[in-house]
Amino acid sequence: TSSKELTYSNRGMTLEEDLNVTNQYYLEKKQAVIHKKPTPVQIVQVDYPKRSAAVIKEAYFKQASTTDYNGVYRGRYLDFEAKETKNKTSFPLQNFHEHQIEHMKQVLLQNGIAFVILKFVVTDQIFLLDATHLIHFYDQKDSNRKSIRKTDIEKYGFLIKIGYHPRIDYLQVVDSVYFPDEL
Amino acid sequence: TSSKELTYSNRGMTLEEDLNVTNQYYLEKKQAVIHKKPTPVQIVQVDYPKRSAAVIKEAYFKQASTTDYNGVYRGRYLDFEAKETKNKTSFPLQNFHEHQIEHMKQVLLQNGIAFVILKFVVTDQIFLLDATHLIHFYDQKDSNRKSIRKTDIEKYGFLIKIGYHPRIDYLQVVDSVYFPDEL
Ligand SMILES: [Mg+2]
Ligand SMILES: [Mg+2]
C-alpha cells in the first residue's frame, strides 16, 4: 500500500484549474454560470469528533455518470467534458467513457449544447469540438481508428484563444458556433 | 468520537431518493436530462492498495457552491434545490444557504429556469416554488419573517402530483409554469 497527500502540485490538473478560473471569471462578469461537478465519492464511514468537523474515514471513487462541466449561457444549457493528451498527432478515444458519450447523446436530444474541450499539451493548443463529431468518431472506434486525428480536430473543431484573463475563452468560440445570429 | 456507517435507513433522504428515481424515469423516457450533483468532498489522503481500488482515508464535507440538481429540458437550463420540513404551517428559510440563493440569482440572470421543491413531510405535500419568490422572502428574512408561510407557498407555488411512476412528476408543473405555449 502506498499513501498520498493530495496537493496542488501532484493533482496534475492544469486544464481543469484553468477552466475553473475561467468559469469564475465568467461568473463574476455575469456572462455565464458554469461549474465543475464535484468528484463523485461513495462514502462508507464517517467519524463525528466532538467539537470539530465530521471526518470521512473510508470512501471510494465512483464512476461519474455525466460530463464534468455544465451550466447556463444565454438561456441555453451548456455541457462539456475537458481532456488533455500528450500525443502530438491524434487524440485517443479511450479518454472518454461510454456513459459520458451516452450522456452527451441525451443532452443533444434535449436540444442542449454539448462539446468537448481538447488540449494538446505539447503544443499548448486547445480545441472545442462539438459532441456530434466526437460521438461520430467514438461510435466507429471498434471498426475504425481508436483516436481522432489532429487534422480532423482542426477541420471539425475550433481553436480556443488562450489568454491571461480569461485564460481559456471558450465562450468566444461558443458564440460563433452556437449563437451566430447574436453576434 | 462517534462513528457511523452510512446506510439507506439512516441517510434520511426520502425526498432526494424519490427525485433521483423520478429523474431516472425522465432520462429513460427521453423527457429530460437532470442529475443530482455529487456531494462535494475535500479529499486529504488516499491509499492505493496493490491490486484493489484506491481508498480515501481522510476527507471532509465541503459547502456546496450551487444547488443540488440541474440539467436540460426542452433546450432550457433547469436548476433546483429540494428541501423538506417537519413544520406544519411554514417553511424555515434557514434551510437555504446564502450561496445557494446567490446561485439562483445568477441562474435567473442568465435566463435559466430556477426553482425549489419544498416538501411538507407531515402532510406529504410537495410544492414547486419559483426562485424569484424564494429570493424575495429570503432577502427580507433579517427584517421580516424567518420562514415562508405555507399559505404563501400555496399562493405563489404549485402543488406537485405524487404518484408511483414517476413519483414526483415536477415536469408537469414545469410545463404549465414555464412552457405554457407548448401545451
Ligand atoms: Mg472528467
Ligand atoms: Mg442540498
Image: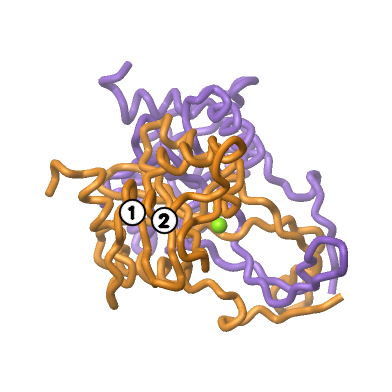
Chain colours: A orange, B purple
Residue on which disc 1 sits:
A154
Count of labels shown? 2
B138 up-or-down from B49: above or below: above
Judged from this view, the residue extending furthest toward the top is B183
Residue ID at (33%, 28%): B177
| Position of A153 relative to A2 (above/below) | above
Residue B118 at least partly seen: no
Nearer-the-camera pick, B168 or A179:
A179
Residue A110, x across and y down, in percent:
41, 31
Mark 1: amino acid: Glu
Query: Which quadrant would the N terminus of chain A be assigned to in this image?
Result: bottom right
Q: Measured from the top left, where is residue A39 in percent x and y?
A: 61, 60
The amino acid on which the numbered mark 2 sits, given as a three-letter code, is Lys
Q: Residue at x 59, y 68 (%)?
A: B62
As drawn, is B55 to the left or to the right of B122?
A: right
Task: Work out whether residue B104 or residue A144 is closer to the camera in this orientation and state it.
Answer: A144
Q: Residue at x 72, y 71 (%)?
A: A54
The residues tagged by marks 1 and 2 sit, at their Cα atoms, a distance apart of: 6 Å
Q: Which mark is residue A150?
A: 2
Place of residue B29 in the rendered image (x, y in percent of width and height, measured from the top left)? 54, 22
Q: Secondary structure at mark 2?
A: helix
Chain letter for mark 2: A
Residue B9: image tag: none
Q: Does A126 sit above or below residue A9? A: above
